[in-house]
C-alpha cells in the first residue's frame, strides 16, 4: 500500500492508496472517534459500492447510517446539502459521529462542508472514487457548494481524518471521467513538477488504459505534490492558489454553461490552455511549450478550446473569482512548464486575445 502523510500538526492525516481498500474497514477504525458513522454517497456510486463498504464497517461493530444524494455537479447546492443534514438529524447522529464521503469530488466537497458545519464540526473521512478526487479534491480540506453566480462560492476549509483511495474503484469510472481526472494530474506537472510532466508525456496512454501500476504512481505523485502545497499554505494565503491553474477561466466555463454541462476537469483543461496562451503572450512560454501542453491534453482526451461564451461573458464570470482582490483579477500563469506564478498585471488586451484564441 502506498501511504502519504499530510503534515498539519494535530490535524495531520494519512492518504492510503491501493486496490481494494473499501473492503478493508479495519483501516478506518483507528480514525473513528466513536463506533458510529454516517456515509454520504450518490445514486451512481451507491449502487456500486455502498453495500460493500457498509457491510465491512458493520462487520467490525460499527453502526452505519447513510444517505444517497442525486448525482452530479448540478446538485452541488443547498437543497442537496440539506439532505445530508436531514439524514444526520433524522438518525440522531452526534457531533462525535464520523461522516464518510464515498464518491467523487462533488460528494466529497459536499460531505466535507456538511461535516464542517453539522453541530459546528464532526469528524470526516474521504473515500474518493474518481481519479480527480483521488488526486486532488479529497486532499487538502477544501469543501464547498456552488452558487448560481459562481463555483464553490460557499464553503469551508475542513481537513479529513483519513483519505482512503481505492484505485480499484476506478475500474468502473467512465472514460470521460478518467480523462477529466487527468487534467488535474497534468496540472501538477505544469505548476511545480516538470519531471512529472515529462513522465506524463511518456505514460499518458498507460493511464488511459488503466494500467494499475501507472495509475497508482500518478495518484501518489499527485497527492505528494498536493500535500506539500497544502502543508506550506493550508488556507491559501499564497502558494496554494497556484493549484488553481486554469481554474479562473475553467470556472467561468462551468458557471457560464450551467453546472454539469462540461466536467470540471474538461473546463480546467481548456482554461489551462487560455492561461498558457496568455503566458506565451507575456513572453514566458514559447510557442513550442504551448504546443506540448496542447498535445498532452489532447492525448489525454481533453478539450483544448473553451465554448464560445463571448469574451464579455468570460470576463464578467471571471470577475467573481475567489482570487480577485480589491477588484483586481489575479491569474495563475506559467513562467515555464513546471513553474507557475500568480500574476495581477496581465494587460486586458492580452487576456481577451488569449480567450479568443482558445475558444471553439
Ligand atoms: P463527480 O463527483 O461528479 O464524479 C464524476 C462522475 O463519476 C459522477 O457521475 C459520479 O457519480 C461518478 N462516479 C464517481 N465514482 C465512480 C466510480 N468509481 N465508478 C463510476 N462512476 C463513478 O466529479 P469529480 O470529477 O470527481 O469531482 C469534481 C468536483 O470536485 C467539482 O465539483 C470540483 O469543483 C471539485 N473539486 C474540488 C477540489 C477540492 O480541493 N476540494 C479540487 C478539485 C475539484
Ligand atoms: N484544488 C485546489 C486546492 O485544493 O487548493
Image (spheres, rainbow, N blue to C red):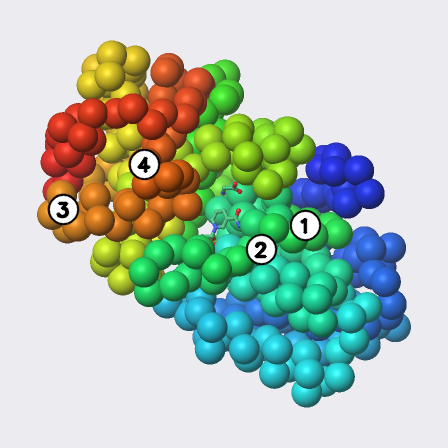
Crowd band around label 1 with a 10 angstrom C-alpha radius: few (<14), some (14–19), many (20+)? many
Of pointers 4 and 2, the one earlier in the residue sequence: 2
Mark 1 and mark 2: Cα distance apart in space: 10 Å
The numbered mark at residue 133 is none
The crowd level at tag 2 (other Cα within 10 Å; few <14, some 14-19, many 20+) is many
- Residue that sits furthest to the bottom in the current view: 90
Label 3 sits on residue = 312
Task: Please tell me the numbered disc located at residue 329.
Answer: 4
Q: Nearer the viewer, mark 4 or mark 1?
A: 4
Q: Indicate yes or no: mark 2 CB to ligand 1 under 8 Å.
A: no
Residue 156's mark?
2
Residue 65 screen position, x and y as percent: 71, 78
In the foreground, 337 or 326: 326
Residue at 71% over, 59% down: 124
Q: Are marks 4 and 3 in contact (CB under 8 Å)?
A: no
Circle 1/circle 2 CB separation < 8 Å = no
| Foreground tag (4 vs 2) | 4
Q: CA distance from mark 4 to mark 3?
A: 14 Å
Quadrant where the C terminus sits is: top left
Amino acid at each position: 500500500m502506498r501511504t502519504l502523510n499530510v503534515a498539519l500538526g494535530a490535524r495531520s492525516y494519512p492518504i492510503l492508496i491501493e486496490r481494494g481498500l473499501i473492503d478493508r474497514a479495519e483501516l478506518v477504525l483507528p480514525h473513528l472517534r466513536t463506533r458510529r458513522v454516517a456515509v454520504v454517497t450518490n445514486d451512481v456510486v451507491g449502487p456500486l459500492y455502498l453495500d460493500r463498504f457498509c457491510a465491512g464497517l458493520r462487520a467490525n461493530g460499527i453502526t452505519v447510517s447513510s444517505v444517497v444524494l442525486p448525482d452530479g455537479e448540478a446538485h452541488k447546492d443547498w437543497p442537496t446539502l440539506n439532505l445530508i443534514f436531514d439524514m444526520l438529524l433524522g438518525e440522531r447522529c452526534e457531533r462525535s459521529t464520523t461522516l464518510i464521503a464515498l464518491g467523487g469530488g462533488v460528494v466529497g466537497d459536499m460531505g466535507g462542508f456538511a461535516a464542517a458545519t453539522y453541530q459546528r464540526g464532526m469528524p470526516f473521512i474521504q473515500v474518493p472514487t474518481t481519479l480527480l478526487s483521488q488526486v486532488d479534491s479529497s486532499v487538502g480540506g477544501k469543501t464547498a457548494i456552488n452558487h448560481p453566480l459562481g463555483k464553490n462560492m460557499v464553503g469551508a476549509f475542513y481537513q479529513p481524518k483519513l483519505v482512503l483511495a481505492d484505485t480499484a474503484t476506478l475500474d468502473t469510472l467512465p472514460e470521460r471521467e478518467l480523462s477529466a481526472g487527468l487534467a488535474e494530474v497534468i496540472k501538477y506537472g505544469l505548476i511545480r513538477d516538470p519531471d512529472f510532466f515529462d513522465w506524463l508525456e511518456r505514460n499518458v496512454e498507460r493511464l488511459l488504459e488503466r494500467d494499475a501500476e501507472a495509475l497508482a504512481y500518478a495518484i501518489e505523485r499527485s497527492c505528494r505534490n498536493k500535500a506539500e502545497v497544502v502543508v506550506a499554505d493550508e488556507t491559501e494565503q499564497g502558494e496554494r492558489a497556484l493549484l488553481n491553474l486554469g481554474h479562473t477561466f475553467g470556472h467561468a466555463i462551468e458557471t457560464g454553461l450551467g453546472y454539469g454541462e462540461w466536467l470540471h476537469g474538461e473546463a480546467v483543461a481548456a482554461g489551462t490552455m487560455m492561461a498558457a496562451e496568455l503566458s506565451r503572450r507575456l513572453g514566458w512560454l514559447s510557442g513550442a511549450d504551448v504546443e506540448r501542453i496542447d498535445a498532452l491534453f489532447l492525448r489525454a482526451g481533453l478539450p483544448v478550446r473553451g465554448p464560445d461564451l463571448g469574451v464579455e461573458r468570460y470576463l464578467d464570470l471571471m470577475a467573481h473569482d475567489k482570487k480577485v482582490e480589491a477588484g483586481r483579477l489575479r491569474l495563475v500563469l506559467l513562467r515555464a512548464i513546471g513553474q507557475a506564478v500568480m500574476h495581477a498585471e496581465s494587460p486586458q488586451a492580452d487576456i481577451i486575445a488569449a480567450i479568443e484564441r482558445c475558444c471553439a
